[in-house]
Amino acid sequence: MRRVATAFVLTGLGLALLAGPAFAHHAFAGQYDKDTPIQFTGVVTKIEWMNPHARFYIDIKDESGNVTNWNIELGPPLILRRAGWRQDSLKVGDQVTVEGYRAKDGSKMANGRKVTLADGRQVFAGSTTDGGPTP
Amino acid sequence: MPNPASSIFIVGMLSLSPWLLAQGDLGSIDGVVSDPDRAIVSGAPIQVKNVQTGAIYKAASSSTGNYTLGQLPPGTYDLFVVMPSFATYRKPGVVIQAGQKLRLDIQLEDTGALNTLGDGRAFFNDIRGVHEVPSGPAPRTPDGRPDFSAVWHAMRDADPDAEIAAEKPPAMPWAAALAKKRTESNGKDSPGVRCLPTSVQLMSLFWLNKVVQTPTLLLIISEGAVPAVRQIFLDGRGHPPDLDPTWLGYSTGKWEGDTLVVDTIGFNDKAWIAPGNFPHTEKLRMITRIRRPDLGHLEFETTYEDPETFTKPWAVRQVADLAPGEEIWEYICNENNQDAEHMVGK
């Protein structure tokens, strides 16, 4: 096998250097608008602990009493699992406050950046190396 | 975490006499580093590169987020903050006059993952940061070869200073234009969005990888990749002469001393080249030289040769850290993929 004539025009290239979007499956920035933050409180109606992204759905009631179901997207289950979370860390019927960014296409979807239970506990936060769920 | 602001280094070029200036002529930059939510970021590595001399100066933000780059000769500087958990911050053309004390507060931005739970800053720090690894020599197989078998973290840049030392990849104009378009649209059209193979390199840049080495076959199992398994034939065979083009090509490997040289051809033109989101053609040949210099590291030097995409071979150096105690898990991407139809892009 020939040894390629290596032109080291670039050593140890960084993704960010080339401004490549950093994504495993997809870049959330392609789907959600960081200029449109949302924060709302609702009741969990369904949990999908599935690939490529875990999701849960919440019913939000507006001032007129109209209920809208929102789809909240998280990272992959196996990453959340490494951080100590399980598919029952959030349960149907839980009241949660969700902070995230709204979908660019106007869908009733948002990414989840902070999820707080009624008693103040946060779910799905923390890293894979900090030993488990953040109190 | 790097040592706080105490760490100010001058990396080379000090012998350039014009810059041996009186103390009063030197300038400085200081400020506070914060995240998109305006919370303090400690341990952020701030680097400036003098455009005229190439000299690099470094500092790190303290526990209060403050940083100081002192002792700067007057000149023009490009400033960078490179952290795996944030998008790279760059501010080119910062001019320092003699004796000037410049205040420059830095607000970092999130990566394209927008700090989503389970795919956020902590995740990127874990997966692409530098890990503490056990020390010792690389293990060897009974036949005396280095044994690459282990679970490894995702590949990361081999050189932490690469971001500021790098030049542009030698892409032809069409390839550079397409890569730019892909990047600006946040990877909207990446095959990975549809649970197809994302990029052609041997090991994942975002997931754990398990390497299983036998005398005749090397398997790389990448958690989260599609497909999860990469075969590299070590039994002396050559490439079949009548390959149908495939997403990830056909890989054969041969030992050169302690380095395994993997030669991959037979690609279709559908997957991307991950650094920079570059395209490639069916003429792509990817040569990957793999070494295990010690127990804790696996080094990759990947050279992309594609005469229809690049004007000359393009080499990328990456390293993976050992992930002791980790195991990889199942990931069936198409299980519930709702994203493709909602990817707007820019």
Image (cartoon, helix red, strand yellow):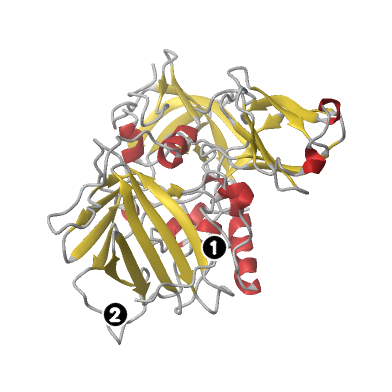
Q: Quadrant of the N terminus of chain A?
A: bottom left
Q: Chain of mark 2?
A: B
Q: Secondary structure at mark 1?
A: loop
Does residue B103 appear anywhere in the picture?
Answer: no
Q: Secondary structure at mark 2?
A: loop
Numbered marks: total: 2
Label for residue A8? 1
Question: What amino acid is labelled 1 in the image?
Answer: Phe
Does residue A32 appear anywhere in the picture?
Answer: yes
- The location of residue B263, given as percent across then percent down, is 35, 71
Query: Quarter-wise, where is residue B308 in the image?
Result: bottom right
- The location of residue B12, given as percent across then percent down, is 65, 42
At 87% from the left edge and 35% from the top edge, which residue is drawn? B97
Label for residue B315? none
Q: Are marks 2 and 1 in contact (CB under 8 Å)?
A: no
At 59% from the left edge and 46% from the top edge, which residue is drawn? A106
Front position in the image: A55 or B194: B194
Above or below for B336 versus B86: below
At 63% from the left edge and 62% from the top edge, which residue is drawn? B181
Task: Provide the residue designation for mark 2.
Answer: B239
Q: Quadrant of the C terminus of chain A?
A: top left
- The location of residue A31, given as percent across then percent down, is 54, 48
Residue extending farthest bottom: B242
